[in-house]
Image: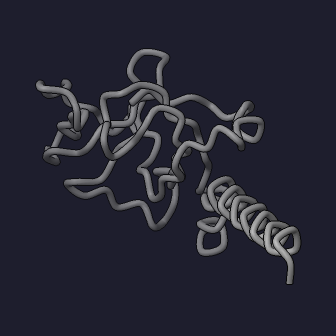
């Protein structure tokens, strides 16, 4: 083989590798739909920095709805809830009779108690932000982290 042939093989391999990374980083959240009813699982894009380093700005969150028979939030899970008209995603620190005490991983203080009525679901997967797949996430609901 000559040098030009070797370069073509290397470039082709790099392109295939990049395409594979792109496919898995964009479609990874969809794999969760296989094991759970589609009515109970949805995806949203994270915006904000309060859950760093676990969740980065732009990551895709796979969320299990509180209406799912599998919904059973535990301490350490990331709870998705409404605060006013904004969806928030913060970690459960403790479970109380009247709701959940939550906190952003990067925040120094705790949030107020989140009531069961505010809860939307719990994060069951995180797909890292992929600038190449940005067009796929344009229609997602944003969740502040």
* Residue depicted at 62% across the width and 49% down the height: 42
Q: Write the residue at 73% across / 31% down.
A: 138
Name the residue nearer the viewer: 85 or 60: 60
The one nearer the camera, 104 or 55, is 55
Query: Relative to residue 138, is residue 5 drawn left or right?
Result: right
Nearest to the observer: residue 78 or residue 50 = 50
Q: Is residue 93 above or below residue 145?
A: below
Q: Is residue 67 above or below residue 3?
A: above
Which residue is found at the position 23% from the left and 45% from the top?
Answer: 92
x, y (%) of residue 9? Answer: 81, 73
Residue 8, position as x, y percentages in the image: 85, 68
Residue 124 quadrant: bottom left
- Numbered disc total: 0
| Whether residue 37 is situated above or below residue 138 in the rendered picture | below
Residue at image point 41% right, 50% down: 122
Asked where in the image residue 52 lies, by quadrant, the reply is: top left
Q: Where 60 sits versus 77, above or below? A: above
Q: How is the image coloured?
A: one colour
Which residue is more in the foreground, 107 or 35? 107
């Amino acid at each position: 083989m000559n040098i030009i042939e070797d370069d073509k093989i290397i470039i082709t391999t790099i392109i295939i590798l990049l395409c594979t990374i792109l496919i898995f980083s964009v479609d990874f959240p969809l794999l969760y739909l296989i094991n759970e009813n589609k009515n109970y699982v949805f995806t949203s894009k994270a915006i904000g920095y309060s859950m760093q380093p676990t969740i980065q700005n732009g990551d895709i969150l796979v969320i299990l709805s509180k209406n799912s028979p599998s919904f059973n939030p535990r301490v350490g899970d990331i709870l998705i809830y409404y605060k006013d008209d904004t969806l928030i995603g913060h970690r459960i620190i403790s479970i109380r009779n009247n709701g959940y005490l939550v906190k952003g991983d990067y925040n120094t203080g705790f949030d107020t108690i989140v009531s069961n009525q505010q809860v939307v679901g719990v994060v069951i997967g995180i797909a890292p932000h992929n600038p190449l797949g940005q067009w796929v996430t344009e229609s997602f609901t944003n969740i502040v982290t």
